[in-house]
């Protein structure tokens, strides 16, 4: 087995069970290998988690790209609303559960999670820039605004207050 063949197996396990069960033995078992082989391929657990989270970020961006309409959004608000609606679909629930695990890890000062979260956010910000209207006056600032509203709306939806999140989406500038 190689890193490239292990990552999809590890990702499937994490998408099913979250990051709480991301210790070496359960991950190795899910991949049909040993914890020693994981360390051989990744060096240490932090490097394994970082590679796994980078792989999951790519999976998420690909899934979002497949689900998102081919044309650019007509406004920042439309982009945010479309992403919010798409990520509310059942097939995106495992991604969001893993994301909230990452956020919780960041809140607990886990350096590996900070690095992964930053990398994931960079991928997603670039994705949003590419899906904003070509006429957007400042796509980087627009992407930051869109991501802030999406993240807040998703969090509010996850705690049972989608009405508040949707009001935030509606208030986003066109």
Image: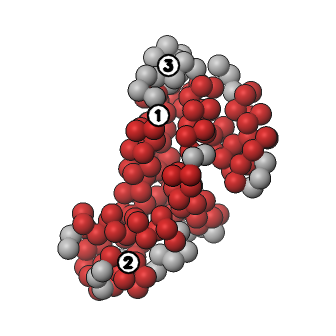
- Residue at 46% from the left image edge and 41% from the top image edge: 64
Front tag of 3 and 1: 1
Kindly indicate whether the residue at mark 1 contacts the one at mark 3 (C-beta within 8 angstroms). Answer: no
Task: Pick out the residue farthest to the front.
Answer: 90
From the image, tell me which residue sits under label 1: 68
Give the x, y percent position of residue 42.
30, 72
Q: Secondary structure at mark 1?
A: loop
Quadrant of the drawing holding the N terminus: bottom left
From the image, tell me which residue sits under label 3: 133
Q: Which mark is drawn over residue 30?
A: 2
Q: CA distance from mark 2 to mark 1?
A: 31 Å
Using the image, determine if residue 146 lies above or below residue 64.
above
Q: Earlier in the sequence, mark 3 or mark 1?
A: 1
Q: Secondary structure at mark 2?
A: helix
Q: Residues within 10 Å of mark 3 (few under 14, many from 20)?
A: some
Q: Secondary structure at mark 3?
A: loop
- In this orientation, does residue 151 appear? yes
On the picture, is 68 further left or further right than 142?
Answer: left
Q: Residue 166 versus residue 44: which sits nearer the camera?
A: 166
- Residue at 75% from the left image edge and 44% from the top image edge: 162
Task: Pick out the residue farthest to the top.
Answer: 135
Kindly indicate whether the residue at mark 3 contacts the one at mark 2 (C-beta within 8 angstroms). Answer: no
Q: Earlier in the sequence, mark 2 or mark 3?
A: 2
Q: Residues within 10 Å of mark 1 (few under 14, many from 20)?
A: some
- Residue at 70% from the left image edge and 54% from the top image edge: 158
Using the image, determine if residue 45 lies above or below residue 101.
below
Q: Earlier in the sequence, mark 2 or mark 1?
A: 2
Give the x, y percent position of residue 133.
49, 19
Using the image, determine if residue 139 lies above or below residue 125.
above
């Amino acid at each position: 087995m190689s890193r490239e063949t292990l990552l999809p197996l590890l990702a499937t396990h994490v998408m099913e069970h979250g990051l709480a069960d991301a210790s070496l033995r359960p991950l190795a078992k899910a991949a049909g290998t040993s914890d020693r082989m994981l360390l051989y391929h990744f060096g240490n657990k932090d490097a394994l988690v970082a590679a796994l989270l980078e792989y999951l970020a790519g999976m998420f961006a690909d899934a979002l790209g497949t689900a998102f309409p081919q044309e650019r959004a007509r406004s920042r608000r439309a982009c945010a609303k479309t992403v919010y609606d798409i990520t509310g679909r059942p097939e995106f629930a495992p991604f969001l559960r893993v994301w909230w695990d990452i956020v919780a890890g960041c809140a607990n000062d886990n350096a590996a999670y900070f690095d992964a979260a930053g990398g994931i956010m960079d991928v997603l910000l670039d994705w949003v820039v590419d899906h904003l209207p070509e006429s957007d006056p400042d796509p980087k600032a627009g992407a930051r605004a869109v991501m802030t509203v999406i993240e807040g709306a998703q969090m509010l939806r996850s705690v049972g207050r989608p009405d508040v999140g949707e009001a935030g989406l509606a208030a986003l500038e066109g």
